[in-house]
Amino acid sequence: MTAVESTTAKSANGMTETLVTIQVDGRPVSIPEGGTILDACSKAGVSTPTLCYAENLTPVNVCRVCVVEVENSRTLVPSCSRVAEEGMVVQTDSERVRHSRKMVIEFLDTSVDLSQTTAPTSNEAGGRNLADWAAEYGADSSRYGPAPQTMDEEVKIQDNLYIRDYDKCVLCYKCVEACGDDAQHTFAIAVSGRGFGARISTEFDVSLPDSACVYCGNCVAVCPTNALQFKTEFDLREANNWREEEQSVTRTVCSYCGVGCNLELHVQDDTIVKVTSPNDHSVTSGHLCIKGRFGWQYVQPTIQRKPS
Amino acid sequence: MVGLATVFGAGGGTSSYKEIEETDVILLWGSNAREAHPIFFHHLMKGLDNGARMYAVDPRRTSSSKFADAWLGLSVGTDIAMANAVAREIIHNGWVNQAFIDHSTTGYEAFAESVESYTLEVAEQITGVPGSAIAEMAKAYATAEKAQILWTLGITEHHNAVDNVLSLCNLALLTGHIGTWGSGLVPLRGQNNVQGGGDMGSLPNKLPGFQNVTDPEARAKFEAVYGVPIPPENGIHLTLMFEAMERSEIKAAYVIGENPADSEADVQHARKLLSGLDTLVVQDIFMTRTAELADVVLPASVGWAESEGTVTSSERRVQRVRAAVTPPGEARHDQDIIGELARRMGYDWGQPTSEDLWEELRALSPLHGGMTYARLEDEGGLQWPCPDLDHPGSPFLHGWLWEDDLGGRAGAPFSVVEHEGPKEQLTEAFPLRLTTGRSLDSYNTGVQSGGYDNPIRYGDALDMNPVDAAALELADGETVKVSSPRGSVEMPIRVQPDIPEGLTFTTFHFPELVDINVLTNDAWDKRSGTSEFKAASIRVEKLPSSDHTPQLQDS
């Protein structure tokens, strides 16, 4: 094939940037230099399943559900972190890719409760969640045995802000990254243990209130499986009253300090049930502090409007 | 804002948050942004991760300062001595940007002379910070390619607040760290729309868009649209209003979304004045302590979740707020309430939407001229000045200082400012310094943050150094009597090694538990109107009986 010439384009900030062009499923796609194969797939309108990837975090390459086939590469490569190189030829829907993604999903499903795995917030997956992808690839974990072997732990409820359900944890490290040097720099949690005993833990496994946690909830916001869940959502789910399809999402600005963080208010029955922040906004990159994330409760109809 | 407006003609932070990610040296001066502006601190951390050095100037060893290369723990109220010594060090070592000074500033000679007495030795004596640390900070700041100075209320809640700000502006003028990407002067705003309030003319001497009340041309423009004459004299700010109440010149007040009966310094005095008014009208979302004093309470809807409108952030970014839930009971949008009041006074303003009001503002304020609701929506907000529809908004201010032609402007003036120290000196009767500030989970007088509970909340407590606590035979958590020349409160102490000896600290988020502003000093700056919340003198006494159990809130 003929090499495709590098071109240049003006970016949003007016700086000239170099473009690279790669082939995605036979079609040429140009993206700014330094972008990933996943960026190119998004640009080409090709959906890609992701779990451990988030646009506001550094890729950690652990879940392998986003793998693609790159010509002349011995192994499949994770599209979320592999930088696109000029002239790369990428297959996203080959038999090898489909088979690998199917088995990744199956293996996860044999050890983790994926029932509340949420759709990625970015649009590159086309809003599809993991169940949709499992159906797409015909994943069937029952062929490995009768029931999934989860860690079978009680949900940890240690405060009124968020809960931890280890049966749903896929060890994607997103929470560790959000708590650490990708955003919050609090370092309250890390991975401890090895093999099947590996788990996300506070220091010495102390309770959250006793840990270094500052309750920004940024770990909860990036969790793809609802292993970390806002208490408001958890309570509504327990009461069988979590109706996401009926919820409205309104973008506004936090009422506390003057930084101007954008909030997305998730509202059900005229009541705020969850607060997130858009990943693509320059102020927050999706991250909030305790006041923005949890300090909205004074608006609720259940709260009498009087200072406590 | 008064300080920045004096030097540069515009009362706004100069820089975008994004810029701190790419700067080289950060002076974090009188700001605990880690707790008071946590998401700004995320941007700052990116800067540190990218290799920036940070110097934290603060009497307390704050959680922010723990990320700094050096913590300069100066005595409360000695900022000007420190800044002037930094300036002298820069001048004496030849680190000034002479070309910038010559072209873009005025008053350098007099300024240079005025800081001559602030040697490192003198500064060390006044501030308590080793001269070598001040010298290191001066060198780092002056010799950096890009550098920013950030501050908050540690600079502005003093009786000489404006001088404090001016002393920091001087450093930027000496080095040219202003008006370029990555350098600047950044006051972090404490409330979600304190910048927007100023933008919209909620200042005694300004019309919307920072146009002067005393300018007949500006007034004429507004009068043509408003259809009424605008009084040509400047109004007065909050602190002067309280003084006017004292003289019975102000007999009625209409308070919107403010809780001065808890938040004012020397608060007992403020409450007395509010109670003595002939008429007090309070418009708020809660029955605050101020509302309890009112003759009429007008229930308002929540600005950011129950109403449409805009707010402006610390980086001058105007953004939309939107209604997501229905206001309870009889609560109404602020603009509806004001419109209804106007109607009953004989002016029918109709039923304008928020966007209608915004369109009027756009037509009158050149800073906001290019900001339609549609653009604010599509572009994630816009930073003023944004004069027309093709203008992309302004990430940073004062680029004009670097133009060959300053457009007839004289340049930015240096300011001669001298160290004064806090109004209230420590005495034998009141030997400890009290300073106040915020904690991460709470906010101001707790009107909003009181609505949620969380595990990191500890309530108001007096932070004391272990040595001071031991000298008074006090245990961590023990309830003590705290007195200033204005009054006394009882509150628990927290023994904190991060608080230097002689200093105490508390938040002011729980006035119903600890009425802390009974203690604070209402000495205030004549120009900004800000009270000296940061420096009172106090005495701590052990309570006689032993039945005072620790009262720290437990989660």
Image (tube, coloured by chain):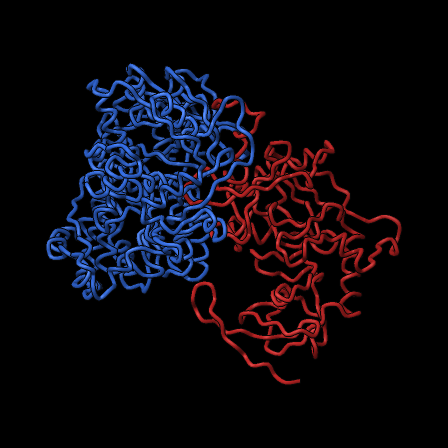
Against B337, residue A91 (above or below) is: below
Quarter of the figure that contains the N terminus of chain B: top left
Rendered image quadrant of residue A42: bottom right
Say whether residue A213 is visible.
no
Q: Colour of chain B?
A: blue
- Looking at the colours in the rendered structure, which chain would you say is drawn in red? A
Horizontal relation, residue A89 to residue B271: left or right: right
Residue lying furthest bottom = A2
Residue at image position (48%, 34%) is B307
- Quarter of the rendering containing residue B180: bottom left
Residue B423 position within the rendered picture, expressed as x and y whole percent measured from the top left:
20, 33
Q: Percent from the top left, x then y, of residue B408?
A: 17, 58
Q: Nearer the viewer, residue B356 or A199?
A: B356
Is any part of residue B429 visible from this angle? yes
Residue drawn at the location 56% of the way across and 55% of the way down: A56
Relative depth, front residue between B127 and B221: B221
What x and y, as percent, mark residue B162?
23, 42
Q: Is residue B178 above or below residue B499?
A: below
Give the vertical position of A153 relative to B181 (above or below): above
Q: How many marks?
A: 0
Q: Horizontally, is B31 left or right of B82 in the view? A: right
Left or right of B504: which side holds B512? right
- Observer-nearest of B310 and A295: B310
Quarter of the C terminus of chain B within the rendering: top right
Measured as percent of width and height from the top left, residue B310 is found at: 43, 41
